[in-house]
Image: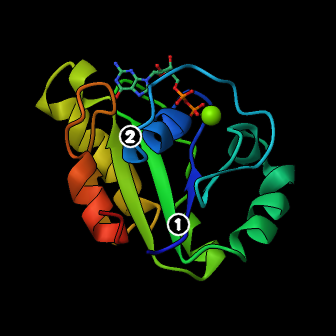
């Protein structure tokens, strides 16, 4: 199994995704610091929202095999600079999250585009709430 590290703004769905892939009950919990959830590295959104904290992300990424960038499809803003993923020198995949709340197909495409620009090699569309797309990501990271 690949060791993953989740990066995305506050509320993107990182912690909920972690709970979903490990079959935990979904419950809201604010991530205040880097947390290891069954081997996955969950990070606070502030690390992405505040450029001065990029260094903390890079240091933490040393432990990871695969970067996982998350973009909420209901969020028009993008916090990933072009080629953001390249900063880590690791493979990266992108998750378009909360697809159950997508206004339309265009919202999904726009989120996907942000992740591709950020340098993600592969994109998955997921809803942790409805458990869609989760098995595909689990298979990709070798978690069965
Ligand atoms: N409708 C819906 N809500 C979600 C989904 N994933 C997360 N959320 C909600 O979005 C909010 C932020 O999620 P959280 O995982 O804490 O985001 P984080 O800050 O990136 O860790 C919470 O209220 C979650 O219940 C999803 O797939 N669908
Ligand atoms: Mg969190």
Q: Coloring scheme of the render?
A: rainbow
The percent position of residue 72, horizontal first and vertical second, equals 41, 33
The percent position of residue 85, horizontal first and vertical second, equals 54, 68
Query: Which residue is located at x 55 percent, y 51 percent?
Result: 80
* The quarter of the picture showing ligand 2: top right
Quarter of the image for residue 136 reads bottom left
> Which callout, 1 or 2, points at the residue further toward the start of the chain?
2
Residue 22 versus residue 56 in the image, above or below: above
Which sits in the foreground, 10 or 33?
A: 33
Query: Which residue is located at x 17 percent, y 33 percent?
Result: 106
Quarter of the image for residue 31 reads top right
Instruction: Specify whether residue 128 is in view.
Output: yes
Badge 1, how many Cα within 10 Å: few under 14, some, many 20+?
many
The quadrant in which the C terminus is found is: bottom left
Residue 38 versus residue 45 in the image, above or below: below
Which sits in the foreground, 24 or 60?
A: 24
The percent position of residue 65, horizontal first and vertical second, equals 55, 78
Under tag 2, what secondary structure?
Answer: loop
Instruction: Name the residue that disc number 1 marks.
Output: 67
Instruction: Specify whether residue 83 is in view.
Output: no
Label 1 to label 2: alpha-carbon separation: 21 Å
Residue furthest toward the bottom?
89
Query: Which residue is located at x 47 percent, y 38 percent?
Result: 19
Image-based side of 31 in relation to 107, left or right: right
Number of numbered discs overlaid on the protein picture:
2
Instruction: Name the residue that disc number 2 marks.
Output: 23
Which mark, by number, is residue 143?
none
Q: Nearer the viewer, mark 1 or mark 2?
A: 2
Image-based side of 36 in relation to 75, left or right: right
């Amino acid at each position: 199994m690949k060791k993953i590290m989740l990066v995305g703004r506050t509320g993107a769905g990182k912690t909920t995704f972690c709970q979903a892939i490990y079959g935990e009950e979904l419950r809201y919990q604010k991530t205040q610091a880097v947390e290891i959830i069954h081997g996955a590295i969950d990070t606070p959104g502030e690390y992405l929202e505040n450029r001065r904290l990029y260094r903390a992300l890079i240091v933490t990424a040393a432990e990871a095999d695969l970067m996982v960038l998350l973009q909420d499809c209901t969020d028009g803003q993008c916090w990933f600079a072009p080629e953001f993923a390249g900063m880590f020198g690791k493979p990266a995949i992108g998750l378009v999250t909360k697809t159950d709340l997508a206004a339309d197909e265009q919202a999904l495409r726009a989120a996907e585009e942000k992740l591709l620009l950020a340098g993600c090699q592969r994109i998955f569309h997921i809803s942790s709430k409805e458990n869609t797309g989760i098995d595909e990501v689990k298979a990709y990271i070798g978690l069965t």
